[in-house]
Structures are given as structure tokens and as C-alpha cells.
Image: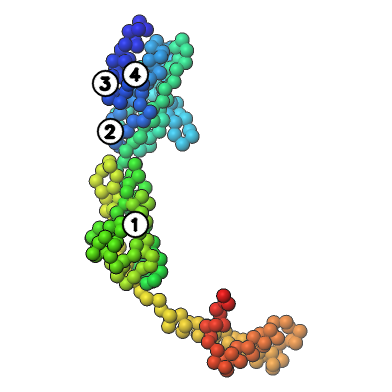
Amino acid sequence: MAAHGWLWGCLFFAGWGSLVLGEAPLEMEVRENGAVSLPCKAILLQPNPTRQEWKFQKDGLTLLFYHANKFTDNYKDRATFTPYEIHLKSVTRKDSGTYICEVLGQSFAQSEVKLIVQVPAAKPTAHVPSVVTIGNKVVLRCEETDANPRPTFKWFKDNIQMPPDPKTSTIFKNSSYTIDSDTGVLAFEPATALDAGDYSCEAENKVGPPQRSEVIHMETSKLNVGGIVAAVVVLLIILGLIIFGVWFAYNRGYFSSKWPVAPFLFSQTRKILILWGVGCNPVSLITPAL
């Protein structure tokens, strides 16, 4: 009887292209929503078991899902059992993990199968700033979180694919950027006026067709030096008026001579008035020394 069981098991496993002499594969891959049969190699070592159980292991947790000749609620409507395999009618990405078959007969035997559920890429999200400053480093990101295996990424500008090396393209040769196809990061270093345009990204793995993100427009602008200087001047004028008001009130006796802040503000006011009198650049007042 034992010899017959061993022979039956070897013949059964011969139907699996990746099995050799009854050894179960370490990994099995199946597309999401597909069916899969998980073999139990341990049964070959214990052909007449007194007990057989299946466990599911993932993220450090182990769950018993087949014991006492029945499935738990999560599996009873989508799984079937034979001594040599567990058949799952339809798998989802949550079913990825390690399946452990334990058999108790004259001794104990255990075998494991790692199931990888393949998931096609979903529509990615492109993170593109609406306005960037010419001369600065600019980073665009393409994000997709569902695919298994992880997808590779491509970027498009004005509906034209951007090559990994811009110098190889007559369209992008005047741009300076890098593309990481594994992370989906597009980095301009530095950004130029020519980098303005409509951007989208694409995610793809071997499971399904490529998926394209929404198109987002990016503008470029020059650094507004004049606006910055004007803002600094206005700030200094306001600060000067506040300090002058305090100085004026102090001289009129509105503040006590024991108040420590007044002499300090008075001294700072004199410095500002002296600097402005000699034509000092006001930007230097707030620019730290290097």
C-alpha cells in the first residue's frame, strides 16, 4: 500500500513541468483572479497520514486554514482539498505568501510552497509641480502601488517619450535630466526654459499592458530678483519705522530709563540711520556673513 502511494504520488507530480522526482517548487506564480493548485510534498513521506493540515504564513503571521478535514470560512467557498494538493479557484493579491502542508503519520513531515500572485500595473499618479524656477533642481515622481512584480516607468513630454539619455535625442538634447526607470523619478538639474510642457508617466510590468497617468502642465519662470529686493526694502522701511517710533517715545520719556529694550532699539536705530545715510546696500543688513 505504501509503495503504491509513493508511485501514485510520483506519477501525479510528473504532470508538473517544474517538478523533479516529486519535489515541489519553492515558488509558484499565478495571475490575480486565476486558479492554482498547491502541491503537498510532505504526503509522499507519509502516504497514510492520521492528520493533515495546511497553514498560511505572511508578514510574520501564521494562520491555520485547513484542519479536522475542513477549511476555515475564508477558504471554504473557494478551495478544494485532496491529500496531494490544495486547489484555489480564484486568487487575489492577498493570497501571496507561504503555504505550509503538515502531515502526521508514523512520523511528522512538512513541506512549503511560496505563492506569488501577479498583479498588473494600475493607472499611475504623476507628481508634477505647476511652476518651477529656471536654474533650480526639479524632481517629478511617478507613483504606482498595486503592481506585482514592481513596474518599470517611462516619462513623456508633450506626448513624446523621453529617452533615458537626453543627449541621444534631437528633441531633448538641450535638456539636462535623469530618469530612474525603477523608482519613476525624473530629475532636472538644472531646469531650463525648454523644460516647460505637458508631462505624463507610464507604468508597466510583465503581467499586463502599460498604464498612463493624467497629463500635467509644468511652467518655468525666472528668479524674480527685483521682487526680492523690493520686498527686502519694504521690510526694512517697516522695521525702521517701528524702531524709530520706539526711539521717539523713549526720548519723549514715555519709557522708563530702566527698561533695557529701549537703549538697544535706540542703538539699532542709529546704526540703520547711519548705514542708510552712507548709502549702504539694505540687503546686506539681513544677509548673514559667509
Residue 15's tag is 3
Mark 4 is surrounded, within 10 Å at the Cα level, by few (under 14), some (14 to 19) or many (20 or more) other residues, namely many
Residue drawn 28% across the image and 42% down it:
206
The answer, for residue 204, to whether it is visible in the render is: yes
Residue 169, compared with residue 290, is above or below; it is above
CB under 8 Å between callouts 2 and 4?
no
Residue 22's tag is 4
Work out whether mark 3 precedes mark 1 in sequence or the reverse, and give the earlier one. 3
Task: Please provide percent x and percent y for residue 126.
Answer: 33, 57
Q: Nearer the viewer, mark 2 or mark 3?
A: 3
The answer, for residue 65, to whether it is visible in the render is: no
Task: Please provide percent x and percent y for residue 145.
Answer: 37, 47
Mark 3 is surrounded, within 10 Å at the Cα level, by few (under 14), some (14 to 19) or many (20 or more) other residues, namely few
Q: Amino acid at mark 2?
A: Gly
Q: CA distance from mark 3 to mark 1?
A: 45 Å
Q: Amino acid at mark 3?
A: Gly
Q: CA distance from mark 2 to mark 4?
A: 24 Å
As rendered, which of 165 and 289 lies closer to the eye?
165
Q: Which residue is under mark 1?
A: 179
Residue closest to the far front: 168
Q: CA distance from mark 4 to mark 3?
A: 10 Å
Residue closest to the far top: 1
Mark 2 is surrounded, within 10 Å at the Cα level, by few (under 14), some (14 to 19) or many (20 or more) other residues, namely few
The answer to which image quadrant residue 187 occupies is: bottom left
Q: Secondary structure beneath disc 2?
A: loop
Q: Which residue is under mark 2?
A: 34
